[in-house]
Image (tube, grey):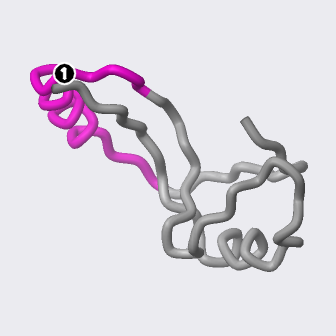
Amino acid sequence: MVKRLFVSIDLPPSIEKALVDLDPRIRGVRWVAGGQMHLTLGFFPDVTRDVELALREKLSAIEFRSFFLPIEGIGTF
């Protein structure tokens, strides 16, 4: 069986709140609950179980600290 997977990072609470407070009628946006918001770093459309396990192993080894990422606008894809 293949899966669709994505790699993401959680948003800081202040950014999440700012997004939740935006106009819910913005065209092309499919809103999710505040606790489900994230920044997608990568999308993998057809992943087999062995590739999923390898991805999880590699990604679990990554460590990072907080970093600055300016938000200059919003868009959809």
User: Toward which corner of the image does residue 23 lie, by quadrant?
Assistant: bottom right
What count of labels does the image hold?
1
- Three-letter amino acid code of the residue under disc 1: Thr
Instruction: Identify whether 11 is placed above or below 44.
Output: below
Q: Which residues are magenta?
A: 44-65
The verdict on residue 39 being magenta is no
Residue at screen point 60% across, 52% down: 67
Instruction: Identify whether 43 is placed above or below 67.
Output: above
Position of 52 compared to 28: left or right? Answer: left
**Screen quadrant of the C terminus:** top right
| Horizontal and vertical percent position of residue 37 | 56, 63
**Which sits in the foreground, 55 or 26?**
26
Q: Which residue is mark 1?
A: 48
User: Toward which corner of the image does residue 1 lie, by quadrant?
Assistant: top left
The verdict on residue 48 being magenta is yes
| Horizontal and vertical percent position of residue 69 | 71, 49
**Which sits in the foreground, 25 or 57?**
25
Residue at screen point 55% across, 56% down: 38
Residue at screen point 30% across, 39% down: 62
> Dot 1 lies on which element?
loop
